[in-house]
Amino acid sequence: MTNSEKYLVDRWYVAAWAHELDKGPLGRTILDEPIVFFRTEDNTVAALEDSCAHRFMPLSKGRIISGHIECPYHGLVYDKNGNCTRVPGQSKIPPSAQVRKWPVVEKFRWIWVWMGDPQKADPNMIPDFHWNDDPNWVSVGDYFYVKGSWRLFVDNLLDLSHVAFVHRSTLGTDGVTNFPVKVTQGDETVHVDRWIFNEPAPPMFQKVRDFKNQVDRWQMITYRPPSHFVIDVGCADAGTGAMDGDRSNGVTMFSNHSVTPETEKSSHYFWHHARDFRLDDRVLTQTLAQATKTAFYEDVEIIEAQQERINTARIDKPIIDINADAGVLRARRMLEGLLDSQKIN
């Protein structure tokens, strides 16, 4: 099985937070490919094969010299295009002294890499995560390395009924599972919406506003293959028209996630959580940063536990689906259809 059969390759993937490159080159495996990311002399980002053409040494362990990267083993130097520009001890550079490069873009405070045909790398195809650097929003976020498949995040983030059990102290309330989801499909998107009426506000929302009474609450998820999720969440005083579009009696936050496969069984998990109120409240920002990090790490623990059992499961173990899986199943079908199309093309 080739990489193109495991993953959608003609897509943009988040490789890093932009600030991760501040300390020098960053090595990260994306779709089974070891890649080194570094800033060039003009402060743009380069993405090269993380393996020297001489003796396979990871370039990510080297240093940046005038926007080029130097191999820490024998000192070969490569430019942003992967061409060797210097071999210590000789003036002639071997014609094949080069490493592969990937298209890369810095946008929304993230570093994006295109893993497929470079001729198809259109930056306009980068999913919209503008909340992460929009001046009208305050966004907190982080990165988790996860010993679990990126596919498990499709299950996790499209079925938020788990919040009542996994996130009891942060996002969950007992009544979530009593309310059905509505699933719709767009052009390479799946939407899963749930309204929860006349229930207590979850703990995280109580941190941002003192809700005295019951609330109407929404969870509106947009999934874009292979693994990008925009989640519009919020709650308003019960019966004040939130479902009809009037959110003035409530609060809205965006809980957005992008998961990049490292391998079939390990992932890079990038997330940010944004709000458009109390923008100058630094204490609230710190409180939400810690609360969301705690909540999303609870998901990491769940996924890693699942992956451990998947790795050792008997071949004939039955797997069932339940009503809450409606959006998950639609997303899986879409994803498999795109993968099948990729094989044909």
Image (tube, rainbow, N blue to C red):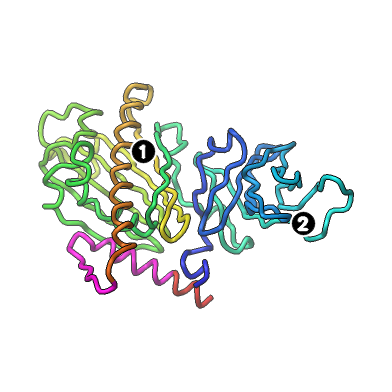
The residue at the point 75 percent across, 46 percent down is 74
Crowdedness of circle 2 by 10 Å Cα count: few (<14), some, many (20+)?
some
Residue 64: quadrant of the picture: top right
Q: Which label's residue is closer to the chain start, 1 or 2?
A: 2
Side of 299 relative to 51 (left or right):
left
Q: Nearer the viewer, residue 144 or 284?
A: 144
The residue at the point 29 percent across, 59 percent down is 309
Label 2 sits on residue: 97
In the displayed structure, would residue 124 be above or below residue 204? below
Q: Residue furthest right?
A: 91
In the rendered structure, which amino acid carries the disc numbered 1? Answer: His
The picture places residue 186, in percent across and down from the top left corner, at 36, 62
The residue at the point 11 percent across, 36 percent down is 214
Q: Is residue 1 magenta?
A: no
Label 1 sits on residue: 273
Instruction: Tell me which segment is drawn in magenta.
Output: 315-338
In the displayed structure, would residue 247 be above or below residue 29? above
